Amino acid sequence: MSVGSLTSQASLAGQQSATQQATVTASQAEKARKAATEFEGMTIGEMLQPMFDTLNSTESVFGGSGAEKQFRSLQVLEMGKQIANSGGIGLSDSIYRQMLAMQEQADKQAQS
């Protein structure tokens, strides 16, 4: 075997390893993005809750029943999720960046 063929084999093995590592990183990044968006949805829902708690719907033609009060928190939570999935208020981006930084730090600690 020549030195050139050994070098090309080592280069190919390094590229395959980098490709596998990039796939894992992409998967982790996708999970982090999803978690950040879900967290933003929950946060927005919690921020909207006091607004709907003070809403008086008893005088409304279609509102004011006990069932409405029972399901109001679920409705507000779903509204928060929809706002976050539609772009949100920008909270998920900062959470996502922080999660990736924490993941990179954990990976570095695990390697050393």
Image (spheres, rainbow, N blue to C red):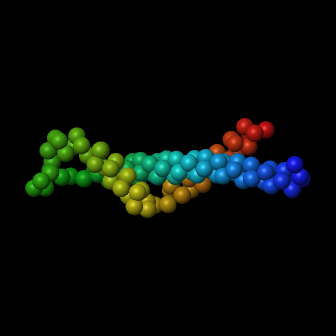
Q: Is residue 79 left or right of residue 2?
A: left
Give the image location of residue 77, x and y in percent.
34, 48
In terms of image quadrants, where is residue 105?
A: top right
Q: Is residue 43 among what the camera can see? A: no
Q: Residue at x 57, y 47 (%)?
A: 28
Q: Is residue 63 left or right of residue 23?
A: left
Q: Residue at x 49, y 47 (%)?
A: 35
In terms of image quadrants, where is residue 11?
A: bottom right
Give the image location of residue 46, x and y in percent.
39, 48
The extreme left residue here reads 61
Tell which of 40 and 7 is nearer to you: 7
Tell which of 90 and 28 is nearer to you: 28
Q: Is residue 67 left or right of residue 29?
A: left
Q: Is residue 38 among what the camera can see? A: yes
The extreme front residue here reads 1
Q: Residue at x 10, y 56 (%)?
A: 61
The extreme right residue here reads 3
Tell which of 18 and 2 is nearer to you: 2
- Image quadrant containing the C terminus: top right
Q: Residue at x 15, y 51 (%)?
A: 63
Tell which of 111 and 11 is nearer to you: 11
Q: Is residue 78 left or right of residue 12?
A: left
Q: How many marks?
A: 0
Give the image location of residue 69, x and y in percent.
21, 43
